[in-house]
Amino acid sequence: MKQQADERPDPSLLRKAAIATGRTVDHAGSVDIRPIVDFDLDRTIFTTLQGAAARFVMKTRVGREAHWHADAGARVQAAYDAANAAQTLPVVDPDLLRFMVDACDFDVEHADGSFLDHLYFCFEYNVHHYPQRSPIVMLLHSILGTGTNTFAMGADKIPALRALMTDFEWRHVEAFPSVLRLLYDLPLRRELRAHLHNAGALSSISFRRVIDNAPITMSGEDLWIQLNYQLIHLIDFLPAANWAANANESAFILFRDLYDLLSTAGKLDVALGYSPAGAERTFQGEDVSVPAWLTTMIPLGLSEKMGAKSVRQFSAQVGHSIAYDISWKP
């Protein structure tokens, strides 16, 4: 049955752990990682992914789930209940929820559950750990397109959506799919890293909107805010366990680099704890096949280049220019 946008999902324990603690954690020892029975990549946002090798790698990474040990799961649930008791989620505009139900199609699976489960996780994390910025951005961050060219709505519905949001919310929602692609592509991160000594000098950035290639210009302040929103989004794609062994996953690489970039620039505003994995590659609680093990051996640099190539191909398929122009104050 298609999930309705106004039905608040019950997050997975993995999501509850992040929301409750404001931390990303390698849960090895607390979970067993098992393949999802009858997993179908074509029921996910990765249905558009092409190439047998790329599809196998993605199926291996996405088609698994964490099964929590009873005591660990109980601790997570208790912490999540306490966090929710201390912080009530805001009421979302009923007209916006109706738009999501009537004008959009979210009937697709995501990294852990449905697409709406992912949106609500990002929304809820935002409420708890980035309260100074609107959580509506996280609820709608991929409504104008995912990184794999799936679109919940058509560009013709943009005026109706825009009317239901504040100027700030709209700026960040329309920019989100584009900035995500610019982050997976390598030049923007390299340029930002080259200017970390004067991060406050970032004046503006111009790029193209994914859904229709329309031009967008953001202030430097808005870009730093946007990058904090992007970091929340990436939490939901991290491996549940065995981080050292799964260090070459594209989203995990991007998360680590963006976390470090924001921290070093003094621009990390979302409350988010992260401790790097140790060097020992283990698969605790995870039975890994030989082909799956081989995917974990892809060098980090090659994995990044593959991700960048993929996002450029996806943009080319929909006529989206991945070029950008950034300005710095003297």
Image (cartoon, rainbow, N blue to C red):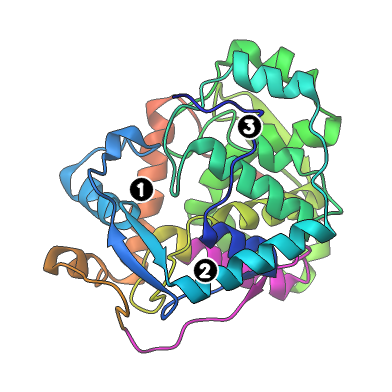
Whole-Å distance between the Cαs marked 3 and 2? Answer: 24 Å
Whole-Å distance between the Cαs marked 3 and 1? Answer: 37 Å
Counting from the top left corner in percent of width and height, residue 310 is at 35, 45
Residue type pointed to by label 1: Lys
Q: In the image, 165: left or right of 186?
A: right
- Residue at 26% from the left image edge and 44% from the top image edge: 39
Is 255 placed above or below 211 here? below
- Residue at 74% from the left image edge and 23% from the top image edge: 96
Residue 263 location, quadrant = bottom right
Q: In the image, 45: left or right of 266?
A: left
The residue range painted magenta reads: 253-281
Q: Residues within 10 Å of mark 2 (few under 14, many from 20)?
A: some
Q: What SS does tag 3 mark?
A: loop
**Label 3 with label 2: CB-CB less than 8 Å:** no
Mark 2, residue position: 73
**Label 3 with label 1: CB-CB less than 8 Å:** no
Q: Looking at the image, can residue 247 be seen? A: no
Counting from the top left corner in percent of width and height, residue 207 is at 63, 37
Quick one: quadrant of the N terminus? top left
Residue 7 marker: 3
